[in-house]
Image (tube, rainbow, N blue to C red):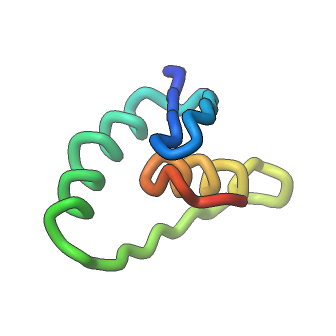
Amino acid sequence: MGLVHIVDPNTKEEHQYYMDDKLQMQLKNRVLPLLNQKDEDYIVIIDGGERMGMSTLALSIIEMINWHFKS
């Protein structure tokens, strides 16, 4: 697990949370460059049982991709 550190460039508010290293690398190296090049939408499906942390994972991914997203 690696630490994700996000700083809002407008308010300088800092937020930190842990995310799987492999997922973090995939988001940084594959998803973010594509989103920066094109104005496209993507769908992510997260599957699992009740109370397994799917909503928390989804919010973590969204926050990493789009730093100004507020939950």
- The residue under the point 22% across, 41% down is 29
For image coordinates 52% across by 69% down, the residue present is 45
Q: Is residue 69 above or below residue 15?
A: below
- Residue closest to the eye, 50 or 61: 61
Residue 49, image x, y percentages: 77, 59
35 lies left or right of 51: left
Q: Which residue is pictured at 50% across the width and 21% down the height?
A: 2
Give left or right: position of 45 versus 13. Answer: left
* Image side of residue 32 versus residue 24, left or right: left
Position above or below: 43 against 27: below
Place of residue 22 in the rendered image (x, y in percent of width and height, measured from the top left): 38, 32
User: Which residue is located at x 50 percent, y 50 percent?
Assistant: 67
Which residue of the protein is positioned furthest toward the top in this rendering? 2
| Position in image of residue 8 (x %, y %) | 52, 41
Residue at the extreme front of the image, as rendered: 10
Give the mark count.
0
Name the quadrant of the C terminus.
bottom right
Quadrant of the rendered structure where residue 59 is? bottom right
Residue pushed farthest right? 51
